[in-house]
């Protein structure tokens, strides 16, 4: 990043190649629209380059990067009404709809049973996209990007305890949502 | 540790975010409590499912570096710097971001939109300002009424420049012009309205009169001789306001009323003259 600060575009390309896909995945999960994930990742790196003078080496680059990504995604979902036009992330999957929901025991939320159906995964992504923004960011960064509570707290400008609470509430919401889904199925 | 207390710790336990002591407590509790043990297993399964579901989309995403470079070369358009400041700033939990329309306007104008333009706190501030303004207007109205009453009965008008002098005039034991009766001052008032110099002199005279306890006594004696003609007393005007009427004459609306009254006097005199000629 220090080289990027001096305008080195090759260093910028290296950063892009390392982080662009995780950022795109974060944005896709945050908005619930995969196509926007790519565009938003490009927006994030555009802002990274434009704001490179403000990067302080004492801050971890990924923290700074995800702070920008989180803010951009927030602006994005507030700019447009995403409700009612959420598309499943695997909408282009040719097998979509043909794969039956496979649950060994619908009454239990056993990990193996839940993971067995794509439909259920799509439902999970919908539930995640419907979470409050801070819970959504905390959950995605923790589960997918494997960030620690402390780093998530820096990104969201809150304490570790607050992050713990955000992730707990998000998990509880997902669990309730899946229970309703399994019950209805 | 009870089942209720363990709540949030179960998720943090799976995320390996508990310290050693808390971790041991959760393990011990989950081992001895079938309900919490089952909850832990459910949460572990859910955690795996969420990881899989959210990671699945990564394989198909292909952000383009060339697209970023292309847009970088469009630097210099208005709003670019504002957009950078907006997204690189920390976000407060629960803060409302600007609406799309606000952002679009900001980008066009190059302005930075941050924080909560329509947040309840700001609304409250606006309401408070409105209430203060309304209160100020009401006070001004009262002051005007008082000033008019005072002007008619005893006090000459004061020019804005001399009003503060009236309010802060040093008190003296006596003054040469204190013998001027209050009704004489009142009579002089209409002429003073059209003559700034006279107004200034009258205001100075008022200051001296007010600065003198003897003068105040004279006025009070004169007033007490004709209680029926004391509108201040009838209105229940407080002594503090009665003693410093000049401070209210600073209000622009009072000055406008003075002009209006002057124009009215001209109109009436012109009308009378034309009737006389007719």
Image: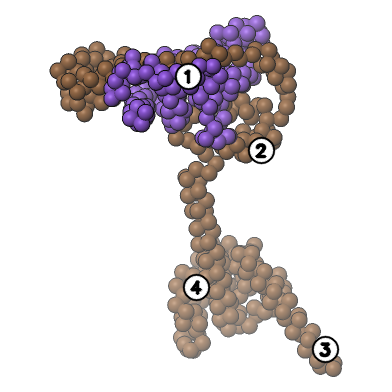
Chain colours: A purple, B brown
| Mark seen at residue B242 | 4
Q: Chain of mark 1?
A: A
In this rendering, does residue B257 appear at all?
yes
Q: Residues within 10 Å of mark 3 (few under 14, many from 20)?
A: few
Foreground disc of the pair 1, 3 = 1
| Horizontal relation, residue B244 to residue A13: left or right | left
**Which mark is drawn over residue A98?**
1
Q: Where is residue B55 shown, x and y percent of the image? A: 46, 15
Residue nearest the observer in this picture, B174 or B39: B39
Label 1 vs label 2: CA separation? 47 Å
Q: Residue at x 62, y 69 (%)?
A: B254
Tell which subunit mark 3 falls on. Answer: B
State which tag comes first along the sequence, 4 or 2.
2
Residue A31 sits above or below residue B126 on the image: above
* Circle on res. B105: 2
In the image, taking residue B17 as reference, residue A30 lies left or right, namely: right
- The mark total stands at 4
């Amino acid at each position: 990043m220090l080289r990027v600060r001096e305008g080195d575009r090759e260093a910028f390309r290296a950063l892009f190649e390392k982080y662009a896909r995780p950022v795109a995945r974060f944005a896709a999960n945050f908005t619930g629209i995969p196509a926007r994930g790519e565009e938003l990742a490009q927006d994030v790196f555009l802002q990274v380059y434009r704001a490179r003078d403000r990067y302080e080496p004492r801050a971890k680059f990924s923290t700074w990067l995800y702070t920008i990504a989180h803010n951009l995604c927030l602006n994005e979902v507030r700019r447009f009404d995403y409700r009612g036009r959420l598309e499943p992330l695997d909408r282009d999957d040719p097998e979509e709809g043909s794969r039956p929901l496979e649950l060994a025991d619908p009454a239990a939320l056993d990990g193996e049973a839940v993971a067995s159906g794509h439909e259920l995964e799509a439902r999970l992504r919908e539930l995640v996209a419907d979470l409050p923004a801070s819970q959504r960011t905390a959950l995605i960064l923790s589960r997918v990007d494997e960030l620690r509570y402390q780093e998530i707290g820096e990104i969201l400008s809150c304490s570790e305890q607050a992050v713990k609470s955000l992730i707990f509430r998000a998990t509880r919401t997902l669990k309730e949502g899946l229970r309703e889904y399994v019950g209805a199925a | 540790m009870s089942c209720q207390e363990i709540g949030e710790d179960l998720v943090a336990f799976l995320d390996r975010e508990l310290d050693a002591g808390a971790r041991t407590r959760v393990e011990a509790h989950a081992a001895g409590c079938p309900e919490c043990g089952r909850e832990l297993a459910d949460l572990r399964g859910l955690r795996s499912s969420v990881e899989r579901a959210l990671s699945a989309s990564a394989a198909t995403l292909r952000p383009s570096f060339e697209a970023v470079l292309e847009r970088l070369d469009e630097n210099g358009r208005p709003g670019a710097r504002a957009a950078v400041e907006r997204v690189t700033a920390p976000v407060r939990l629960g803060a409302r971001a600007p609406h799309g329309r606000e952002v679009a306007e900001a980008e066009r104008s190059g302005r930075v939109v941050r924080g909560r333009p329509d947040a309840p706190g700001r609304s409250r501030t606006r309401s408070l300002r409105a209430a203060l303004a309304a209160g100020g207007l009401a006070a001004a109205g009262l002051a005007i009424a008082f000033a008019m009453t005072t002007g008619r009965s005893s006090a000459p008008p004061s020019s804005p420049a001399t009003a503060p002098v009236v309010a802060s005039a040093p008190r003296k034991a006596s003054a040469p012009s204190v013998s001027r009766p209050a009704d004489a001052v009142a009579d002089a008032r209409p002429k003073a309205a059209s003559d700034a110099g006279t107004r200034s002199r009258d205001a100075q005279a008022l200051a001296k009169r007010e600065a003198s306890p003897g003068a105040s006594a004279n006025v009070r004696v004169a007033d007490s001789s004709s209680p029926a003609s004391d509108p201040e007393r009838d209105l229940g005007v407080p002594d503090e306001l009665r003693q410093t009427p000049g401070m209210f004459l600073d209000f622009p609306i009072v000055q406008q009323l003075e002009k209006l009254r002057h124009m009215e006097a001209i109109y009436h005199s012109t009308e009378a003259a034309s009737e006389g000629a007719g």
